Amino acid sequence: MFVGMIAVLLLPRAAEEGGFLTGLGFQGVHWFWPLAIPVLAAVVAFIATRLAAIRTLQRQS
C-alpha cells in the first residue's frame, strides 16, 4: 500500500503540453483514502464472516 502511495506521489505533475499520466494523484485529505480502504475491507469481511457463522450455527441447533 505504501509503495503504491509513493508511486502516485512520484507521478509527473500536470503540464500544459500534456502527456501520459500527468496530473494524477491525491491532494490534501484525499491521501487518507488509500489508508481507509484496508480498514473498510476488514470491517466488511468481519461482518460477512460473522453473519455466515451465525447463520450456520442457527442451522445446526
Image (spheres, helix red, strand yellow):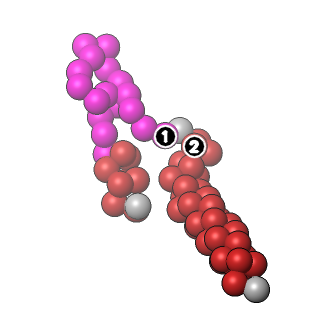
**Neighbour tally class for label 1: few under 14, some 14-19, many 20 plus, Cα within 10 Å:** some
Q: Position of residue 10 (x, y in %)?
A: 31, 45
Residue extent of the magenta highlight: 10-26
Visible residue check, residue 47: yes
From the viewer's perspective, is residue 35 above or below residue 15? below
Residue placed most toward the observer, 12 or 57:
57
Q: Position of residue 50 (x, y in %)?
A: 68, 74
Element at label 2: helix
Q: Would residue 17 appear left or right of 6 to someone viewing this image?
A: left
Quarter holding the C terminus is: bottom right
Q: Would residue 17 appear left or right of 31 to someone viewing this image?
A: left
Query: Which residue is label 1 attached to?
Result: 26
- Dot 1 and dot 2 residues touching (CB under 8 Å): yes
Query: Which residue is label 2 attached to?
Result: 30
Residue 15: within the magenta?
yes
From the viewer's perspective, is residue 34 above or below residue 2? above
Q: Position of residue 9 (x, y in %)?
A: 38, 46
Residue 8, quarter of the rendered image: top left
From the viewer's perspective, is residue 6 above or below residue 12? below
* Amino acid tagged 1: Phe
Q: Would residue 58 appear left or right of 42 to someone viewing this image?
A: right
For marks 1 and 2, give the CA distance: 5 Å
Residue 20: within the magenta?
yes
Q: Position of residue 44 (x, y in %)?
A: 63, 61
* Amino acid tagged 2: His
Query: Which residue is drawn at the image coordinates 64% and 71% (left, top)?
Result: 52
Visible residue check, residue 46: no
